[in-house]
Image (tube, rainbow, N blue to C red):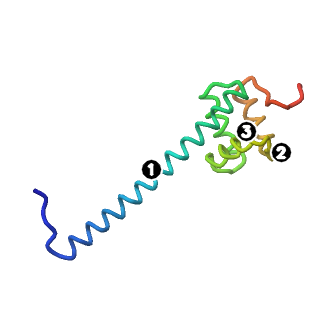
Amino acid sequence: MPPVPNNADDTGDESERVLALEEEVEQLKEAVSSHAVVDQAIGMLVALGRVSSDQGWAVLKDVSQHTNIKLRNVAELILIWGRNGEITPDLRAELEDALDRHGPTQLPGTPPQ
């Protein structure tokens, strides 16, 4: 049988534990959401860039590192591009460069070389 709190210190410890667990749950929710966004962006790169999922992951990392944009944000920008066709020229150029480094691809809508 668990010990029964018999003073304010025990109650305070329990409150701190509950708060810590609530924070951990929020962090896990954010991680799951972030993972889904990244996976969807990799899927777009696989479909549009004709790369493997491992290559898609490498492309995302490269773009993130070369643009100094967090990987999750790069993934979000790629998903926005997929939905409405809008992408900044700088991000598009970096995406094309990363795809060139990691796969035999060309982005749709890009004139043949």
Crowdedness of circle 2 by 10 Å Cα count: few (<14), some, many (20+)? few
- Residue 101 pos. (x, y %): 72, 30
User: Which residue is label 3 attached to?
Assistant: 82
Local SS, label 2: helix
Quadrant including the N terminus: bottom left
Going from N to C along the chain, the mark reached first, 1 or 2, is 1
- Residue 44 pos. (x, y %): 67, 33
Tell me: 39 left or right of 27. right
Tell me: 34 left or right of 1. right
Residues at discs 1 and 2 in contact (Cβ within 8 Å): no
User: Which residue is label 2 attached to?
Assistant: 89
As shown in the figure, which amino acid type bears the numbered disc 1?
A: Leu
1 or 2: mark nearer the eye:
1
Locate residue 36: give its quadrant. Answer: top right
As shown in the figure, which amino acid type bears the numbered disc 3?
A: Gly
User: Which residue is label 1 attached to?
Assistant: 28
